[in-house]
Amino acid sequence: MTGRIDVEKDGPGESPLAKDEYLLSLPQGLSIIFPVTLVYFLLMLDTSIVSTAAPEITSQFDSLLDVGWYGSAYQLGYAAVQPLTGRLYTHFNTKWVFLVFFGIFELGSVLCGAAQSSTMLIVGRAVAGLGASGVMNGALTILSACVPPHRQPLVMGLNISFGQLGVACGPLVGGAFTEKVSWRWCFYINLPVGGAVAILLLFLRIPGAGNQPPPRDVLRTAVRSLDLMGFCLVAPSVVMLMLALQWGGNQYAWDSSRVIALLVGCGATFLVFLTWEYTRGDEAMIPLPMLRRRIIWSAATTMFFMCGVLFCVNYYLPLYFQVVKNDSALMSGVHVLPTIIAQVGFALVAGSMVQRFGFYLPSIATGTALTTIAYGLFSTFGSSTAVRDWIGYQILFGAGCGMTSSMSFIAIPHQVPKPQIPTAMAIVVFFQFLGGAIFLSAAETIFSNTLRDQLTQTVPGVNVGAIIAAGARSVRQLVSGPQLADVLRAYSTAIDRVMAMGIALAAMAFVFCWGLGWRDIREKKPEEEERLRAGGSADRDVSAGEGRGESVEDLGDGREVVELELEPEPGPGGWKS
């Protein structure tokens, strides 16, 4: 089988690597990396800042059963739009697509800050998630275009570490705003910082992912070029799944007609979506041949489980400190500092080690193993857990997450052709935040059902409905004495069940991360790079195959068509990844 790929010709003595280094030259390179990293920090801060504010919000709106939606709505909007963002960045100017999505994120922040009801807050979170979906993919695409491959581990590690800093600082910042000012400033804070960043980005030249067609040509054929039909199929499928997970066991029984209809509708719509994507081939929003590549499905599934791992801790660890340990919103944020410090520190160390030694698999495998152990320790939390224990467990968890968080995004640019990077990143980020949304909803279901059952069984005579409706921060105002101890034990048991689910998620991430492969991503020596360009012993990766022989046709306009013979590989997938 023969494959053809249209590539840019290099000038005399110039390689693609040299072009990337030019993009990283001072001061332009750093002037791009700084605001993109700051935006990434804001986005990830927004994923967890609600966690310490949630008890106060649920008490103000009498909406404890909505607490899962404050996180899930953000993830829902994020996951529903994420597949489309890859097509948008492929076909339109990177900077303007990035800024439009950032504007949508800021609009969602305004709606959340001004919310007068729990429903309005949930809608605002969903809008913010829609914007964040495009900003996240754009940030990763911009960095992969600006930074040469051998520098990406450190830069990506720095970017992801700031993201982890945002996730980890969310409870602390949210607690400070909730206690000292108002929980509404958890969202308003995005406006001044985001506005300054947007103004800075307006005056910078941001590189794209490759040759892009004129916008008019894309708009004339938008339905086909952007695969809008595929988007119209996958988005409602995700929404129905999320509604089923959120309602099942809470508002409605799992065997109720509403929940069953949502699950059936989700499955049927998703099957139609897969059929449509199959007929679209390489023009699909999520090209199925790309999903068959080991690097793609391994990175996607690993991040699918790891995002659930991270978000469950970010929401339920502060809840444990506030309810069981009687911390204020601010102090619960202070008490998760061990996680913050360990995550940031180990993310930077892991990125530096990968850049130095060239292999990312040892970092992600070790990180997922440590995270699994940490979740097992978290599941033993109770009202008498010692300070040294919960500090040590958090350090172990933070180290594992820090070593894992950026590795999938480091692996993608080194094994995927540059024009396909936005789509590949979109696929991985889609599965990442879909996992966060699904498992956060599942955690809320486990927590709510366990809490209700425990209160009914262990605290006879107590008004279970009143305790749940009062919100987490109001428990001590309703019960006292021996009853309070039983209620706190019920809360602790419910949180432990959530952590037990996290053990399985982290273990699955450990299993799937091995598919990323053992690959040296350090800068190639000149003679090795020349051998690669000449079609030597090293394989050339094209779409879903590898080059075994090649011929080059000069198109005369600065481009070449490289014709490669593709060799089938026995086993699942048909072609080598």
Image (cartoon, rainbow, N blue to C red):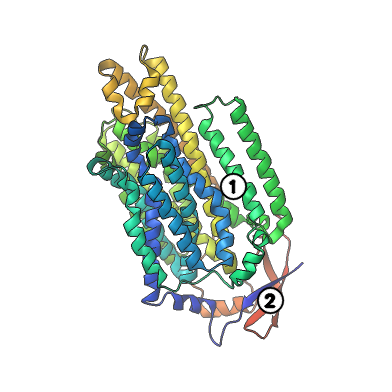
| Residue identifier under label 2 | 562
Q: Residue furthest top?
A: 461
Q: Quadrant of residue 7?
A: bottom right
Q: Earlier in the sequence, mark 1 or mark 2?
A: 1
Residue that mark 1 sits on: 235
Report which quarter residue 423 is drawn in.
Answer: bottom right
Which residue is the extreme one toward the bottom?
A: 12
Please tell me which residue is depicted at 33% across the width and 19% down the height of the picture.
Answer: 486
The amino acid marked with disc number 2 is Val
Name the mark on residue 259: none
Label 1 crowd (10 A; few <14 / some 14-19 / many >=20):
many
User: Which amino acid type is shown beneath numbered disc 1?
Assistant: Ala
- Mark 2 is surrounded, within 10 Å at the Cα level, by few (under 14), some (14 to 19) or many (20 or more) other residues, namely some
- Residue 439 x, y percent position in the rendering: 50, 39
Asked where in the image residue 472 lies, by quadrant, the reply is top left
Secondary structure state at the residue bearing disc 2: strand
Residue at 26%, 23% (x, y): give it: 477
Quadrant occupied by the N terminus: bottom right
499 up-or-down from 17: above or below? above
Please name whichever residue, 234 or 564, is drawn nearer the observer in this view of the structure.
234
